[in-house]
Image: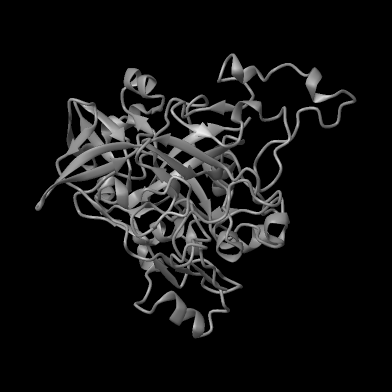
Amino acid sequence: MEFRSDGGNLLRKRVACISAMIVASAILQSGTASARERAERGNGGLLRAGNGPGPAANGPGPGCNIIPPLASIGTKVDISQFPPPDSLSDPELAGPVQLLKSGKFDIPIEQLTGINVPAGTPRGTITLPLFKGAVSTPSGLKPAWYIILDAGDQAEAERLGVNFSKKLHNAGDAARTAARRADGTFLFDSGVVDFRPNREVVAGSKDKPFPPSVAQPGSVGDADYSPLVLVDGIIYDAPVVAAAVDDVFINFPNGNPNYGLVHDQVVAIDPANRTVTLSLINGYSFGKPVFYISTESSDPTVSAIEGNTFAPRLRRIETGVDDINRSAVERIFIATNGASEGGCQNPQRQGLGAALLDGHRPNNTFGGIPTTATDYSPVWDANVYEWTEEAIEKGYRGLLTEEFRILKLARDGYITGPGGAPYGSFGPVIVCGVAARLN
């Protein structure tokens, strides 16, 4: 099954942000054959390949759409009689919260639970400030197009309208260095991203779609590149979203960008007005639906499935340490074999297998995010889990949206690591900035 974009870029990605999650590179190691060649050799036509963000966050059914319903459902009164959500006065209380204050959403975040949002329209995007810095290369200074999603200093995070993460100061040399220029933009000492590769992903089979038989990332950072950057004693999460080229080459303010020059999660980019529009992705944190942005990972297979940039420097991050004092990470929980029958119409749908079969989001579950916990980090340690045959046969498998529910099932033996391995960190990290809490 082949999907092509209207603009002629190689196939748009149908599995974006399968959030982190993936099995060790050894399990997922792909051969050298292309996705097309593998598909033609009998992989059941399960081709999911190409550049671009893939399906919208505002999906077609309960298994692919996490936007909350009207609060008035089940009552005899109209929603107009309901008071505003408590979260509008205190973001730690129930209700929707826009976390990235610097962004503009196409979905009215703070009105959710009070209005109906039709499936499919709007898509589910955020438009953010686009910064034009510079990066030192062997051939001289080049443009560096980046966004900022998080900062390791609370006052700076508030100034920028981004998330604060106290854990970022533990990133160590996984962060590259930069100087702040007179105009406030960053001059990076090194590190560039190549957006030219074509992303390719092929599901393993219909019966066992995960791990994929082919997984090749669509953008790759060099050995020095990291989205984490140390500037004036503060570590920022500042992902590069376009190639080191001049404005004219990445001028796609109305969409349909050249994915050989921009990040696969970019929907539109406007260098003249210094904005970029990115696709949002569905997830959960402590039972609450969230939107997030996936930008990098430390593993090429993860990046292929996620639709983000492979940044090998992120392998310097220590995993498996969660919330201890030296930790730079928070955990993300990813099912390999969650419910997939019925695709988006299945309200219990979750996991990498489902995403590889139907192309929509895997509905991953995060640990702490701003407003619900102080241990938030945009650097997510992939805890990949597999439902046991016993759990599936007994009908226990379902959508898991809360960290301690997952940990309890691991303790009780109903989920394990992939292939029956002990449950825990799988190794790769994924960099994802959380954009909004939906209720």
Q: Nearer the viewer, residue 265 or 225?
A: 265
Q: How many marks?
A: 0
Query: Closest to the observer: 164 or 387?
Result: 164
- Work out whether 385 lies above or below 279: below
* Camera-nearest residue between 240 and 387: 240
Specify the quadrant of the image occupied by residue 70: top right
In percent of the image, x 51 and y 54: which residue is there? 385
Q: Give the image location of residue 86, x and y in percent.
A: 65, 17
Question: Residue at image x 73%, y 35%?
Answer: 116
| Front-lying residue, 406 or 432 | 432
Q: Percent x, y for residue 125?
A: 53, 41
Say if residue 248 shows up in the picture. Answer: yes
Location of residue 67 by image quarter:
top right
Q: How is the image coloured?
A: one colour
> Is any part of residue 326 visible from this angle?
no
Expressed as whole percent of the image width and height from the top left, the position of residue 435 reads 49, 34
Residue 246 left/right relative to 255: left
The residue most toward the right is: 76
